[in-house]
Image (cartoon, rainbow, N blue to C red):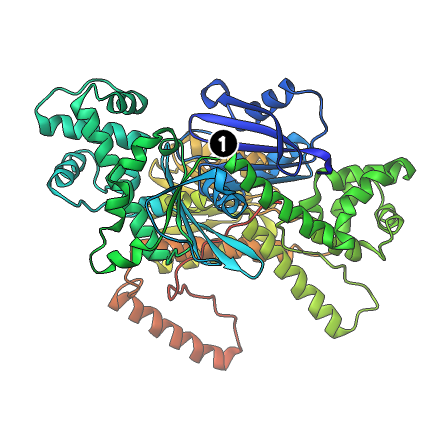
Amino acid sequence: MLPFDSPRLIADIGGTYARFALEMAKGDFQHIDSLRCAEFPDFAAAVSAYLASVPSQHVEHAAVAIANPVDGDLVSMTNYHWQFSIEEMRQKLGLDTLLIVNDFTALAMALPRLGPHDVRQIGTGDASKQSVIGLLGPGSGLGVSGLIPAGDGWISLGSEGGHTSFSPHDEREIAVLRYVWKHYEHVSFERLVSGPGLELIYRALAELAGVAPLALSAPDITQRALDETDPVCVDTLDVFCALLGTAAANLAVTLGALGGIYIGGGIVPRLGSYFDASRFRSRFEEKGRFSRYVAAIPTFVITAEHATFTGASAILDAQLRTLNADPGSAILGQIRRARSELSPAELRVAEHVLAHARSVLNDPIAEIARAAEVSQPTVIRFCRSLGCEGLSDFKLRLASGLTGTVPVTHIQVTNHDSALELGAKVLGNTASAILQVRSQLNREMIDRAIDLIVHADRVEFYAIGHYGVVAQDAQFKFLRLGIPSVAHTDSRLQLLAASVLKPKDVVVIISSSGRLPELLEVAEKARERGATVIAIAASQSPLVRKADAALIVDHVEDVSTHLPMVSRILHLLVIDMLAVGVAMRRNPDGGSLLGGEADERLDEASVSSKKTDSVKGARNEAPGVSIASPLARLTSHSR
């Protein structure tokens, strides 16, 4: 087994413990350690503490399996308070690659790599080769995933199937459901088939038995059941295993998992022979008309100690092999190797690219030169020193080298472009900028901004200069939605307007840089008056830090050579998202936005306007708001 060029950091992060290892060669996990999450303020601190505890190693690539859905760049743990940006974490830890995957997605990818000694079969059944495989396992929650065969490999399913609704099977389980309904409106399988679920079942059965429940944790309940020292604990574990059998059978018929159902997690593997003799398998096969179907499906308990590590490593290895398959994708490694041969000015460009690879993909040459503190010709010389024809060619090669990124580029317009080429570049650059903003969207912030506007007494839009048209467009859209709105674009009147804001008012401040003193003063005055502030501005800007909700638009244009056209389009699109979201929130059935008479008056006004326009000349008509389709989920995947 050949060692890797550098060790790979592999981690498995749960709600209680964070497990780490260094993979020195394929499947060779060393320096395995488990740290309590509660001992560290955030994910970065835990990783840093682990790396400080092992012999000094230069780690370039890392894969982290986390007990949480992974949907975009922002990771917010469901069962713990850690929250982080994948890209910011990659830069903070100095990694070339940081892969974050759901822990059960990682565990699923380990299944084809497990041998007979890594699993234990429960009951009968034979797995069909190259068939769908199901996976579930209780721990701090109930993880659910699956594998679908695809050619010579497998596709893992990112699933939150643990949140499917619980269905009782007998009178005792109905009693458990009635007890849980006293505390929770919705009862999912995860609510009961998990560590916290064990404790909930115990309290429900204690009430059913007419005894006072003890303050027992899930491990305490399990141990008392295995020792048969507490009848309620014995019943609790019996119900737990039966419910897991039902959940497993549901997964089997949902996926058509003829390749078998595998049980992982932190609870079942510790039950040993008790689980083999429990009601799990008999309940699994109790599927009415489909009993014969599920009886043929084998079920296995995963006994391999580091199965999640194996799966996360496999996903990381596949990503890196894809990366290395393209000769141009090793551009970042080429830059590192070339640093000693670059001039001081070119070296500054190299350091900027290595530190901000994703943003460089979309930045114009003027911004790259400004950030690296060099001239624009120096940027071109740097690109050509790497064998690229120019900046556009360099960005294409860089895009192919960033795992999980979309090759989004900014292409310079030149005097030699034909009209067709010029049009294609302008439209292409605009589309690229839109994709960049899409990758930065934060669903929680969008939801929060929409909620604030929906409940506002009045919404005021503030912008200066070229962005005044964005505020005016927003005023029109929200007035048409029946929301009292006004746009303030005169800096001399803005502070006066902010001085009369009320606590239930919402202020939306639109700024490209987020640094204009006039708008920062408006934000401070609004907060002072008790109003809520929504910022549509650049990340890390002072305006974003003063806002209650921030919608990020990072796009730099060289205003010394042209008007900020693309930036205004991006800000207009953000306003559209808010307008559509508010319209859907206020009228989820998709009917008229305003009501019969109001819509009729607008339609008549529109007809009248068109008649006037036919005499006086054409005018541009401001767009309305469509709620024909729901606001799409716009997220990104970090490198």
Tell me if 628 is positioned left or right of 169 in this view: right
Q: Which residue is mark 1?
A: 305
| In front of the other: 157 or 84 | 157
Q: Residue at x 25, y 68 (%)?
A: 596
Could you tell me residue 386's position as x and y percent?
86, 49
Q: Is residue 362 visible?
A: no
Could you tell me residue 257's position as x and y percent?
39, 55
| In front of the other: 578 or 323 | 323
| In front of the other: 442 or 494 | 442
Image quadrant in which you'd find residue 179: top left
Could you tell me residue 48's position as x and y percent?
61, 23
The N terminus: image quadrant:
top right
Q: Is residue 108 visible?
A: yes
Tell me if 328 is positioned left or right of 475 in this view: right
Tell me if 304 is positioned left or right of 447 in this view: right
Q: Specify the amino acid type for callout 1.
A: Glu
Q: For mark 1, does the 10 Å Cα neighbourhood hold few (<14), some (14 to 19), or many (20 or more) residues?
A: few
Could you tell me residue 110's position as x and y percent?
52, 43
Q: Residue at x 30, y 25 (%)?
A: 218
